[in-house]
Structure formats: structure tokens, C-alpha cells
Image (spheres, rainbow, N blue to C red):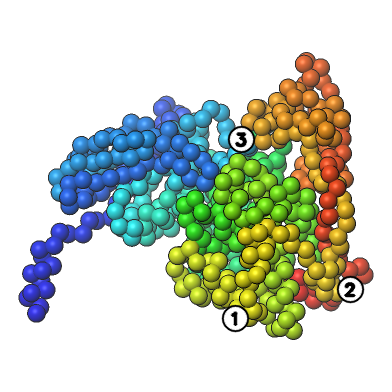
Amino acid sequence: MGLVALGSGAARSAAPGPVSYTVTPELKGADLDALAVDVRLDGDADGETWMRLPENWSGVSDLQKAIHDVRAEGAKLQRVGKAELKLTHAPGAPITVRYRVRQDFKGELSAGGPPFRAAISKDRFTGLGWALFAEVSGPVGRPVEFRWGPTPAGWALASDLDHSVRVANTGELLDSVLVGGRGMRIVEAPAAGGRLRVAVHGDWRFHPQELSNLLVKITEASAGFWGDHGEDFFVAVTPLRAPGGGTAQYGVGLGDAFSLWTTTDVDSAALKHIVAHEHQHVWFPTRVGGVRTGKDEPLDYWLSEGFTDFYTLRLLLRSGLWSLEEFVEDYNRILRAYGASPVKTAPNNMIPAAFWEDPAIADLPYQRGLVLAAMWDYRLRTSSGGRHDMDDVVLAMKTRAGGVQNGRAVENLRLSFRQFGGSLDSDFTTYVEGGAAVILPADLFGDCARVTTTDEPTFDRGFDTARTNEAGGVVAGVDPDGPAFRAGLRNGMRITGRLTPANTGDAKTDLAYRVDAGGAEKIIRYRPEGRRVPIQQIELTAGMDAAKRAACAKVMSGG
């Protein structure tokens, strides 16, 4: 039998080796011109291998426009359609495919849409794997290797792919971020038994060491809750320009990393929230079962994003990074936005088609998932006499998933909740699929705080900020019935400065802009009050002593 097995194995074609990717910054003179990508692979045994260039990802299309000078050695290359490459070669032949990535938009990264295109300027670059790497067709688990080419003098290069030369598969290669630059700062620190690295481009209100210290605390608190220690993590921070003086933040979780793009004046509260949120994406949704893929993926965002926000707030309070007041302030920000949302009752099947086009629809899964998690947490605590809460459910989801991503996070939630508190079937029908408004109970946090409901004006800037940012600060989309129009703002004026602090949701705080109105400077000041709607807000119980505050921090954070 042993001889038969040996003969059978020898007759088979050797399994292809790993696909090896090398990325090298190419300079013209002193300035960065492109990222050169070399892909080395063994061709398929049938003499035909297919590759796919970056094309569409997370609402960003035509990524292949940044790919230039595609050529192959060891195979005949044919471009098919916009993004496919057909390689014809001798069976199993070694092949090298080379191409360059250049920025396909003018100027700096700016607010107004997800900044997921490869950004390559004269002295730095930021690129997600989804925008940089051509994918080789074939077995999903085919191993992949990554290396940097020579580093230019005075430059630093960094990526989560540095954690190991051998990457588990192509999916992990694509789910990565690569950054580099002249004078880019990298801070390293031990965290929860692993290594944390933070790479920062540009000058910021905070020092990179401050961000590293924040991340160490978040990492250790997360590892303590989820029970996962000894993992390396990487964070890339890239500056974002907001025409007209606004603020903006974008983040994307990438398994063992996240990439953050933000305006350099980001305040401490916003920074803590987005950093903690993206770090929770290590677990939501991948380690609790994963979400659906393809065009149906946004149907599960209420869990993957909403539960992430729920645990972001819990973690920041539980870790001591937030006070009770800061926890309530951020919670109230989300509750106010949910209450004022013009699409609050949109059914879940509306989300996929409009998620990347309508900012209100894009925000809804975050808001809806958080208030659902809060309602279900209250139900568990109440029905079990305080023995169980959502912590038990999500940890059971992780156990049930068993490290497998199969798009079953929602089903794992349903089954895990049943272990502790009954059925969610009717809630899924009413609130998730049907879009009914979630009303939180007044005693959500017991005697620590009250949830109030009052009719209040919505926050309304009165003009389209996304279109204004895209137009370089030229005002667009002024509502003739809105507060900005009543204050004198008109389409075509150019915003040259913001005279009040960033305001992302408080209708009771004035906005003031300096504008150029046909050569004349004007100051436009107004209160951004829109239509009146029921708004829920949390009010801390007054007069609590230190012991009671500590007890309430534990209750309100689930700790």
C-alpha cells in the first residue's frame, strides 16, 4: 500500500508555491513617482492563469485606473475588460507580473467620500491592499508572501503585512494597509502580550506617542474582555483635508490593523471614539461569524457597525478612558442623530442600494444596531435579575463561530441570545427588517440615569456639506427653507473659514462661517435648527458620591 500511495503522489502535479508580492517606492529625483508592485507565482497546470486588478471596493469604483505599465515575464499577457488579466504560459511556469500604482486624482486627500483610493504624493503614500494588489485566481487558501523592496533614504515604510512574511491567504493580503513617507513617524509599544505599532504622516494636534498610549489601553481592555492576547496590531494615520475648515474622520478595520484618515484638528473625544470603534472591528464581525458578502453585505451592517459602536462606548467607560459624563455625552450624540434621522424608519432592505450614496442611510445601521443592542441588553439584565447581559451573548457568538467566517454572525446572535433570554425573531421582523423606531426605556440604566424623551429641533446646517467639500468650499445645496438661507448663505459663495468650533449635531449651538460673496467678505452666523422630532437623551442622576459613581460606571459599561 505504501508503494501505491507513493506512486500516486508522484504522478500528481506539484502544488503551486506561494504567490509573492513585493512593493517598492519609486522616486523620480527626490519625489515619489509610483509604487512598483512585482507579483511572482507559479502558473496553473493547464497553461492559463487569471488575475484581477483592483476595481471596486466599499463604495469606491474604478480603482484599476491607478494601475499602469502592466507587463509579464514568463507568460503572454492579455488584458480582458477593465480589470482582468489572462496569462498564457507553459504548464506550471514561473511568472512575474509587474505594474505601477500612481494616484489617479488631483491634489490631496479630502473629505467628501471614502478615502480608499491609493494616495501617492511626492513625499508619502497610503494604500489599502484592496487598491494596490492584483489578485491571482485559484484556491482561496493559496499562501501568499509579502516583502518591501529597497527603502528610499530618509523614508520609513510600514504595514500590518510586516507581522509575518507569510500571509495566510489572498484575503488577508487585500485586507491590509501600506504606508510610507519621508520622515514618517512610527511608535512601537507592547500591548496585551503583542506588539502595537502606530505610523503617522504629517503634523497633528496630538503627538504619536499619545495615540500609542491610548491604543495600548484600548488594546488591553479589549483583550481582557474578549480573551485574546499576544496579537500584533498596526495603525496607520493619514491627514485629510476638509475644504471650508470642516472636520472629518474615516476609518476602516482590517483584522490586525486599521487605517484612519482624519483632519489634523480632530478633538480628543472624536479620536477616542473612532480609534476604539475601529479596534473593535478585530472582533465585529469577523470573530463572531462574519457578515454576508457581495451586494447583500450592508444588510448586516446594523450588527457589524451598530454592535461595534455599542461596545466602543462600553469599552471606553469600562477602561477608564471616559468618565461617566463623557460616556453619556457620546451616547447622547448618537441618540440625537438617530432621533433626528430623516430615514430612521427605513426598512433594512433599503440599506444596500443607498448606503454609499445617502449619508443618512449610511449612518442608520450604526445607530439602529446600537439602540437595539442597548434594548436587548436591558431585556437580558431585567429578565435574569442581573445575571446576564449582552456581554454573555457576544462572547457566546465568538465561541459559536469557532474562528470561522461564514456569514453567520446574525444567526449566531439569534442562537446565542436564545441561550440567555428568549427569542429575537419578532424584533428582527419589527425593528431590523421593518425599520420600526426603537424607544429605549426610561430606566435603561436603573437609578444611575434616566432616559428622557422630548420634542427638539433637529440639527440642520441648511446646505449640502459633502457637495460643498467636493467643490473646494464653494457652497452648494442651500435649502431655501432652511436656517442657513435665512441667515444669508447662498449657493456659489465660498467658505473661507469656520469661526465656531466643529459642530456635528448640536442644534442649540450657533454656526458661523466667513464667506467670500463675489469678492465681498461676509460673516454668516445662525442656529442650525431644523424640524422638531422626539429625541431621547440620557441624564445622569445628580449628587452621586464616588462610590455610587464607580458602581454606576460598572453598570453602564456592563462591567
Which quarter shows the N terminus?
A: bottom left
Residue visible at 64% across and 79% down in the picture: 422
Q: Residues within 10 Å of mark 2 (few under 14, many from 20)?
A: few
CA gap, disc 1 and disc 2? 37 Å
Residue visible at 24% across and 56% down in the picture: 17
Horizontal relation, residue 175 to residue 427: left or right: left
Kindly report which numbered mark, 1 or 2, lies closer to the viewer in this rendering.
Answer: 1
First of labels 2, 3 by sequence position: 3
Asked if residue 439 is positioned above or below residue 84 in the image, the reply reads below
Task: Residue 442: give x, y in percent of width and height.
Answer: 84, 68
Asked if residue 181 is positioned above or below residue 341 in the image, the reply reads above
Look at the numbered disc 2 and give the secondary structure of its residue: loop
First of labels 3, 1 by sequence position: 3
Q: Is residue 283 visible?
A: no
Say which mark, if any, is on residue 110: 3
Look at the numbered disc 1 and give the secondary structure of its residue: helix
Horizontal relation, residue 141 to residue 252: left or right: left
Q: Residues within 10 Å of mark 3 (few under 14, many from 20)?
A: many
Residue visible at 62% across and 60% down in the picture: 433
CA gap, disc 2 and disc 3? 46 Å
Horizontal relation, residue 516 to residue 452: left or right: left
Q: Residues within 10 Å of mark 1 (few under 14, many from 20)?
A: few
Horizontal relation, residue 480 to residue 359: left or right: right
Look at the numbered disc 3 and give the secondary structure of its residue: loop
Kindly report which numbered mark, 2 or 3, lies closer to the viewer in this rendering.
Answer: 3
Which residue is the site of mark 2? Answer: 545
* Front residue of this view, candidates 367 and 73: 367
First of labels 1, 2 by sequence position: 1
Task: Work out which residue is located at the far right of the displayed protein and give it.
Answer: 543
Q: Is residue 263 visible?
A: yes
CA gap, disc 3 and disc 1? 47 Å
